[in-house]
Amino acid sequence: MVLGIDLGTSNTVASTLSRDHVPLLIPDLNNKQSESTPSAILFDGKKALAGQLAQHLFELYPSKKIHRFFKRHFGTYNPVFVDEYSNPWFSETLAAILLKKVQHDASSFMPEPFSKMVLTVPAHYNDTQRKSVIEASKLADMELTAIIDEPIAAALYYSHQVEQIEDEIIMVYDFGGGTFDLTIITKSNNKIFVIAKDGISNIGGKEFDTIVADQIRNNFEMVTKRAFPDDPLLYNRLLLLSEEIKIKLNTKDEGDITKWFSFHKQIFQCHFNKADYGLKASQLIEKTEKAVQSCLRSLGMSFTDINKIILIGGTSNSYLVYDYWQKKINPDKQKLIYHQPLASVAKGAALYASSLDENANRFEAGIQLQTVSTYNIGLKSPETGQVDLVINRNTPLPVTGKIIYKIDTGSSDSFAVILCQYWQKDTELQELGTIFVSGFPYSNADLLLEIGIENRANGTIAVKVKNAETGSDIRFEFKKKTLQHEFNFSEQQKLLKSVYINAV
């Protein structure tokens, strides 16, 4: 048996294949009517409640802290929170709790143990974010067969189950709870070719929630004549209420909404005008269109070159997103595909997991992916700030690049350079860590130091350092920036083992 998991910012969805190879969603063990798990964690003493149980307990005891949107912290290696015992908890550990909950649900639902598991990631994830996902699976004691970009997983599902997309240019528009991803692909037979990737890392359903939250906060301040309380627990409650109202406003048949609220013993009323909400939401959607146009321009293409647009992700559930793009397409030449936007990624991951199984049937056997580098990859001088490009963005993966530095060993016994990823190096450069080489033997001769960068098929990066003249490997240290709380795998593993997950 196989398992595909869409580890989402707002909701997590898991899928497996039936005996006749149809993707099925894994139901929540505590609520068989639900086929998704809210990506939420709440701690109650030594209990860690995940998913709907966390949300239900928070509704009963709003003074407790609920952790949501922790996926946005992947790759930062900063703790999400520090508990009462001064233990730092990282996003990877919270994700592991969620994965263990989903694993338990799947084990109860599936007739046989699963042997292959695939996790999905946003297409724009960088090296450290992808490695965070891998760390989360290790903490959860789950054997990870592969990670796959969410838009590619969705394209797999649509092409195999719903719609033929052979020899066409496809845009997968993935608007999720925390991120926006754009992937341009084409497909021939069982091979999917990724042409380009783009995205916005800090825009998603959370920003739609903020539209509602801001109005509630402003109404509170207008009625009380004082600032909204700086209270994390109250803020959590505000976000949950905002999400509920946002979902209704995103529904086509829902009209204006009037609702009473009670915060800090103050009762007040809010009227949510659907037209006003739609105007502000459309401004967020326009930002995604700018990313679409920028990506297409970089390819020398225009929007008219796209044959089909696949809408996926929780935010794509909004009729505002569908209507926005329906007005943009030429219905005689282009098609907007909107089918199971919340489930398609997990189902595609299950199909891909099955293709990696030696017992895969003809339907899934032979699926091949040819993806591209999401970012430019370069090496930055700590002294001058100059960035040397090693691997170009949107280069087919896997790919290896190298650069040679001439070291005067007579005047220096060490060398350091910063590994970085970027779309635009002046505004979006992300430093991954420092490559540090030391212990050069004293010599008047120059040393030709070759630094090789490999961008693997799953988007993670490996580094090798060699003597360019002899080809011999040179030992080096890869140093990440020092943080107040360093991520320690064994300590996080102990913390995880110290709590009971969904034990009520």
Image (tube, rainbow, N blue to C red):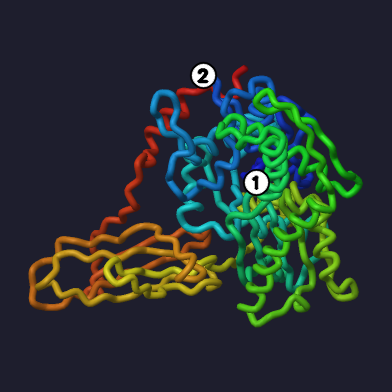
Residue 446 in sight in this render: yes
- Compared to residue 219, the image places residue 419 above or below, namely below
Q: Which is more toward the observer, 315 or 442? A: 315
Q: Secondary structure at mark 1?
A: strand
Q: Earlier in the sequence, mark 1 or mark 2?
A: 1
Residue depicted at 55% across the width and 41% down the height:
70
Q: Distance from label 1 to label 2 (Cα)?
A: 29 Å
Tell me the crowding category of disc 1: few under 14, some 14 to 19, or many 20 or more residues within 10 angstroms, Cα based: many
- Compared to residue 13, the image places residue 324 above or below, namely below
Q: Quadrant of the N terminus?
A: top right
Residue depicted at 76% across the width and 59% down the height:
282
Most extreme residue toward the top is 504
- Compared to residue 96, the image places residue 356 above or below, namely below
Q: Quadrant of residue 16?
A: top right
Q: Quadrant of residue 281?
A: bottom right
Kindly report which numbered mark, 1 or 2, lies closer to the viewer in this rendering: 2
Q: Position of residue 430 (x, y in %)?
A: 44, 61
Q: Position of residue 421 (x, y in %)?
A: 45, 65
Q: Amino acid at mark 2?
A: Gly
State the residue position of label 1.
6
Q: Which mark is residue 45?
A: 2
